[in-house]
Image (cartoon, rainbow, N blue to C red):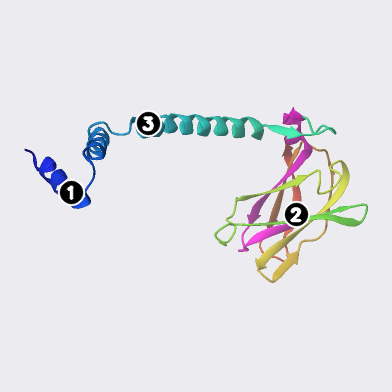
């Protein structure tokens, strides 16, 4: 007689079950021990592929929707166009000075009114190197991106000190274009903002 049978008989004597109840209980326990619950394993195994499929479907949906914009009045999704890149103006200012400063601030004036301002500094708060280009991106939300504007540059010496460079530079701009300027001079007082003869 096995150890299990001995323990079962001992348990049967303590609980005082009828022979039929004891046999039924023994059979049900034996079946549970010999045949693990297959339903639990099957459910567990089928959840993994399902989760993988749902994850992949979500990622594909995110990728597809990230390339679409809601531009229709009815809220219908329409494809994003490359024309959005043509709705901006890039101004590139090259540092051709021999003095140290932290960044450049550009003020844009249209019809005598200041319509936009951007400041660019190095992310690590280091000084701007000679020959380094600083990029300013103006979007159509900033101001009307066509026509004559006047640009004023200021040299950022520290967090509280910006020195404007005079005179302002008049320039005719068109959306979708890139304009190149440079700051030249041996000191803040003698520096000038000039338009370079290149454009894109």
Q: Residue tagged by mark 2?
A: 193
**173 or 73, which lies in front?**
73
Q: Quadrant of residue 129?
A: bottom right
Q: Work out whether mark 1 precedes mark 3 in sequence or the reverse, and give the earlier one.
A: 1
Secondary structure of the residue carrying tag 3 is helix
Q: Is 37 situated above or below 120?
A: above
The residues bearing labels 3 and 2 have C-alpha atoms spaced at a distance of 77 Å
Rendered image: mark on residue 39? 3
Q: Work out whether mark 3 precedes mark 2 in sequence or the reverse, and give the earlier one.
A: 3
Q: Residue tagged by mark 1?
A: 11
The residues bearing labels 2 and 1 have C-alpha atoms spaced at a distance of 99 Å
Secondary structure of the residue carrying tag 1 is helix
Q: Residues within 10 Å of mark 3 (few under 14, many from 20)?
A: few
Q: Is residue 132 left or right of residue 8?
A: right
Q: Is 43 situated above or below 159?
A: above
Q: Is 13 situated above or below 127?
A: above
Q: Work out whether mark 2 precedes mark 1 in sequence or the reverse, and give the earlier one.
A: 1
The boundaries of the magenta stretch are 77-106
Q: Residue at x 77, y 44 (%)?
A: 139
């Amino acid at each position: 007689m096995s150890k299990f049978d001995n323990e079962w008989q001992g348990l049967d004597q303590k609980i005082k079950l009828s022979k039929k109840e004891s046999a039924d209980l023994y059979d049900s326990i034996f079946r549970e021990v010999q045949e693990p619950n297959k339903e639990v394993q099957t459910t567990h195994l089928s959840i993994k592929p399902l989760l993988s499929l749902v994850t992949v479907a979500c990622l594909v949906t995110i990728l597809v929707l990230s390339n679409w914009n809601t531009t229709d009045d009815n809220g219908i999704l329409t494809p994003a166009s490359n024309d959005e890149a043509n709705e901006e103006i890039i101004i590139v200012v090259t540092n051709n000075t021999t003095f140290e400063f932290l960044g450049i601030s550009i003020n844009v004036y249209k019809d005598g009114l200041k319509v936009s301002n951007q400041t660019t500094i190095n992310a690590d708060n280091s000084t701007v190197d000679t020959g380094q280009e600083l990029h300013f991106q103006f979007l159509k939300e900033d101001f009307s991106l066509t026509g004559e504007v006047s640009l004023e540059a200021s040299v950022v010496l520290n967090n509280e000190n910006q020195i404007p460079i005079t005179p302002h530079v008049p320039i005719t701009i068109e959306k979708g274009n890139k304009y190149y300027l440079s700051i030249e001079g041996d000191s803040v007082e003698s520096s000038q903002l000039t338009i370079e003869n290149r454009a894109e």
